[in-house]
Amino acid sequence: MSARTRRVASIALVVIGCVLALAGGVAFYAREQIFDSDAFADNAAETLKDDQVQQALADPIVDQAIDRGPDALINARPLLLSATEGVLASTPFRSVFRKGARKVHKAVFSKDRDEIALTVANADVLVADAISAKSPKLGAKIPRSVGDRLVELTESNALLTVVRVSEDVRFFGLLLPLVALLCLAGSVVVAVDRRQALMIASSGVAVAAVIGFFGFLIARAIVLSQFDDETVHLAVAAVWEAFFGGLRAWILGLGFIAILLAAAAAMARERDPLVPARRALALATRTPATPWARAGRAVAVGAVSLVFVLQPTLALQIVAVLIGAYGLFFAACELLGMIAPPPARERARRAPPLRILVGGAALLAVLVVVVVVLVSGGDEGKREVSRPPGPVVNCNGFSQLCDRPLNEVSFAAAHNAMSAAELPGWYQPNQRNDIRSQLDDGIRAFLIDSHYGINRPSGPVLTDLEREGTSKVLEGISAQLGPEAAAAFQAIDARYAKRGGEGKPGSYFCHVVCELGSIEMGKTLGWFRDFLQTHPDEFVILFIEDKVSPTDIATAFEKSDILPYAYIHKPDEPFPTMRELIEADKRLFVMAEVDAGSGAIPWYHQGFELAMETPYTFTSAEELASPAGCVKNRGGTGKPLFQLNHWVEKLPRSPSTAEKVNGFDFLVRRARLCQQLRNDALPNIVAVDYYNKGDVVDVTQAFNGVPPDTKPSYRNAD
């Protein structure tokens, strides 16, 4: 065999060996950690230690309990969540869960099931017992048969087929690593210069490890991108770490060993460990001799730049791995060089095949990253979404609204929209679903309360009593939630006020006080911004109960990048039509209840100079439906906008009462009565509790003259 043939064969065996080592290592890991029932069950149980996984699993259990139990349960959702999460984190439950996961794993691979579900029969008993320990009365209300069917894996043969095919090829986890080892050993045996071949083989394995690590990061990013909900996203990240964190460690360990071998082989030839870096830099900066080579270099540079633009975090991770890998190589070379200096005659020899291998592998890694980034799409930061081409056909879902002025349109509204049961920490919530769901369900006006809060590492966000005034806060709690709530607030404040250092002050949306539920203002405004970006023909109204100063409100809006959508209404001028507002992309109307800044903030309007309202404190449905429920309140009379406050102020809050008063006939009768008594003023903002109960969206559709069977049509700008 000629020297040239031996060199080619050695390089070919290195390439094949590195590819098989990477594929075989992944297959071996999957064989031991994914396809083994005991290891799978252990990993599954390990995920329950993560707070986000606990919350993601607890949410549906608690929702099921609330749906099946009495009304009062929704007011204690934080307590239910806390107790359920405690159960999920407990050793007894993890033991039960581990057994269920092992049973599911075996069922998946038994090839005789079309529907697989993880069932833990004692979950409802454990949850009820945990809640009863904290509140016997509440525990007695927990319905049984809750939480016994925790995770439904699939009802489709497709996923099971994929899993079973993967199981059928598990033997590759043993075969491929063995073949890879033989190929790498063979590359050294057949080489002309075996020391050089050892350096090339070990460097190739190190490059394969780097590519494998990039693949790990890319796969993780793709999987997590499929989950928009923050809690589920974080829970999936924790599950990924539990199942595949060992694979990352294996890849890094293999790369570390390969780097040490490469360094040992290199120091048998070169004294200076920076020589490979200089050669690589010279190769990258030298102008190629042919047009095709120059074009290839331009494409490679453009691809790398594209990665930094589209996925800066991922790009920085890649750079960190490359620098770290070479740093390890440099350190190993230096130490080995001090221990055993290379012979002088070997110092000047070069290794072109290594340069070609490293350069080609690096280019391959970049191309893989670019392809996946382009397929998965997107910048991790803020998205700039432009309006789609074409005329505005439907305004807030219906063509009938487009040529009407804003004050001749009726908007379905959520009262205390931020106070949502499905968000963590909200006691006595006014809504079941959060603002994102409200927008999806057709709510277009939002009554939200702003407060100053202090975020500390432990406990809930605390109301900033120094900025709001302790006496005023207590008066507000007593008036709206009763003296018992005021006492509970003082107990919570005393418990947490001295914990966690000074804390970070900020602006929040809270109801009465932040200890009973809060959400950061900027985060909420980001939800509205994202909706307006992706729904170019929708108009949204925000009516803020302002405990936060106009200046701080303005700062939060500016930081959220939502102000380009803000409509500025000039006093004494008629409102534009919905079409005009949407075509101008001014689709956000913001009002303050008390202090909008005396005109210093043009887009922040003094609400009750433009709107009038009904009373808002009703103790029964009968009182709500009476003529007294329509008398003038804030804003007096004669304003262009009319807000119909339509809820029963009952504690604990009752979704069933909301369902009654939000029913189509009840709500229409009351709205018509108030319209008649208020000089034929159209109810522009129809605000309700538990909008998902009853027919508030259908009622506003009727007031807008849209036929009852007409479905809204929304244009998207994704």
Image (spheres, helix red, strand yellow):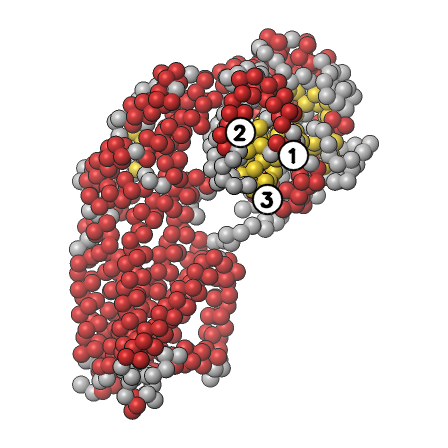
Q: Tell me residue 220's x, y (percent).
A: 38, 52
Q: Decide: marks 2, 3 in contact (CB < 8 A)?
A: no
Q: Amino acid at mark 2?
A: Asp
Quarter holding residue 509: top right
Q: Is residue 39 visible?
A: yes
Q: CA distance from mark 2 to mark 3?
A: 39 Å
Q: Dot 1 lies on which element? A: helix
Q: Nearer the viewer, mark 1 or mark 3?
A: 1
* Dot in front, 2 or 3: 2
Instruction: Give amino acid for label 1.
Output: Arg
Name the residue rendered at 66%, 39% in the picture.
Answer: 553
Judge left or right: residue 89 versus residue 432: left
Question: As displayed, is residue 273 above or below residue 135?
Answer: below
Position of residue 77 relative to residue 169, above or below, is above
The residue singled out by tag 3 in the image is 533
The dot on residue 467 is 1
Q: Mark 2 highlights which residue? A: 493
From the top left corner, tell me how far across and down residue 534 is, in percent: 57, 43
Q: Residues within 10 Å of mark 3 (few under 14, many from 20)?
A: many
